[in-house]
Image (tube, rainbow, N blue to C red):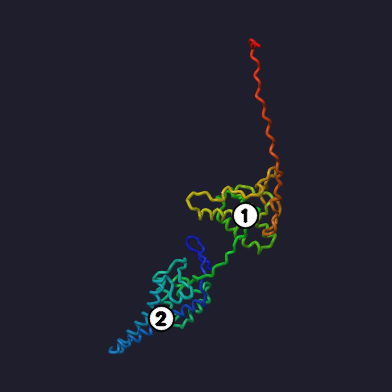
Amino acid sequence: MSDLVTGDAVVLGLRPARLPSRALAILLDLCVYITGYLLLSIGLAVATASLDDAAVAAVSVASFILVLVGVPIAVETLSRGRSLGKLACGLRVVRDDGGPIRFRHALVRGAMGTVELLGTFGTVAVISSLVSENGRRLGDVFGGTLVVRERVPAARVMPVPPPPPWLAGRFTGLDLSAVPDGLWLAIRQYLTRMGQLDPQIGAAMAVKLADDLVAKTGTPPPAGVPAAAYLAAVVHERQTRDAARAFSSAPGQQPPHAGYQYPGHAPQHPQGQQPHQGYGAHGQPAAYPAPYPGPGPAPVQVPVAAPAPAPAQAAPVPPASGGFAPPS
């Protein structure tokens, strides 16, 4: 990677092209240009057969400059730094700030290339490329340009390991809006590379990331959950929400998982047990992906018989009203 910095203090992550790939691109370009120059020379020789020697020499010099100097400058200007050889090798000429080149950059490169490549048969260009840190020849130095690689092998993206099954659906109500993207990236990088870390170092990193995540969400984690498992479960919850929003049929539709509780799971904070406030004060938890302690056996629910209904009470007998007794 190059260490070029723009005027806005932005570091450019460009990969400068090295001498072998640049030499191959130049050879391909020269083969095309020399072939075109020979064909043009044959045609001009036939067309200028009736002219004198001075005119023939002038036409030859003009054709040489046009094909071997003017054409490369025009090609680089119109293609924004991609000649035929550079396109075949996956290279491109850019400015020092990473932008596309213009006519003046291509003009300086072409003029210096006549001396470096054609005048000295590439000796000066090879020496300057070997001495330069970014493989630049004199044309690049004077023109303020850099040849970079466009086709860079893509890095292998490791998937995030899934959380333990007993943590599924435990963080559906967690507020993740305040978690910054930098913290999400750090958590993802840790989860994808934790198998390559030392167990103690990996556990300490998991505790630090879990404490940062708890501070951003404002919700303490469940008691007894390892830090790495907590991170994996929260990342999985965020991915589930993103997928639900992406595939939602109507705007503003609530994700289908919101508020859903998986059967057989213990509540997040059991009654009578206070959740801890963070991971740093409770020692080093087991490193992921060590076996996780489950939420405990589900309580056995003994069916209780329904109470028998109370017997119906007889209608109360109204008391005898005062007055005379009915006749016998």
Does dot 1 land on a helix, a strand or a loop?
A: helix
Which dot marks residue 13? none
CB within 8 Å, label 2 to label 1: no
**Does residue 106 appear to the left or right of 253 in the view shown?**
left
Quadrant where the C terminus is found in the figure: top right
Quadrant location of residue 324?
top right
On the image, numbered disc 1 is attached to which residue?
233
Q: Give the Cα distance between marks 2 and 1.
A: 60 Å
| Of the two numbered discs 2 and 1 in the rendering, the one whose residue sits closer to the viewer | 1
Q: Is residue 254 above or below residue 34?
A: above
Residue with the most extreme front position: 328
Place of residue 46 in the rendered image (x, y in percent of width and height, measured from the top left): 31, 88
Furthest toward the left, the residue is 50
Question: Dot 1: within a 10 Å radius of its alpha carbon, few (fewer than 14), some, or many (20 or more) residues?
Answer: many
Crowding at mark 2 (Cα within 10 Å: few <14, some 14-19, many 20+): some
Residue shown at 59%/64% (left/top)? Answer: 158
N-term-proximal mark, 2 vs 1: 2
Tell me where residue 285 sits by quadrant: bottom right
Q: Amino acid at mark 2?
A: Tyr
Query: Is residue 31 toward the left or the right of residue 179 in the image?
Result: left
Residue to which mark 2 is pinned: 33
Image coords of residue 9 (percent x, y): 50, 61
Residue 122 placed where, x, y %? 47, 81
Label 2 secondary element: helix
Of residues 175 and 73, the one drawn nearer to the viewer in this rendering: 175
Q: State the image coordinates of residue 88 (x, y, percent, origin top left).
A: 47, 76
Give whichever of 176, 13 is nearer the camera: 176
Amino acid type indicated by mark 1? Ala
| Residue nearest the observer in this picture, 101 or 203 | 203
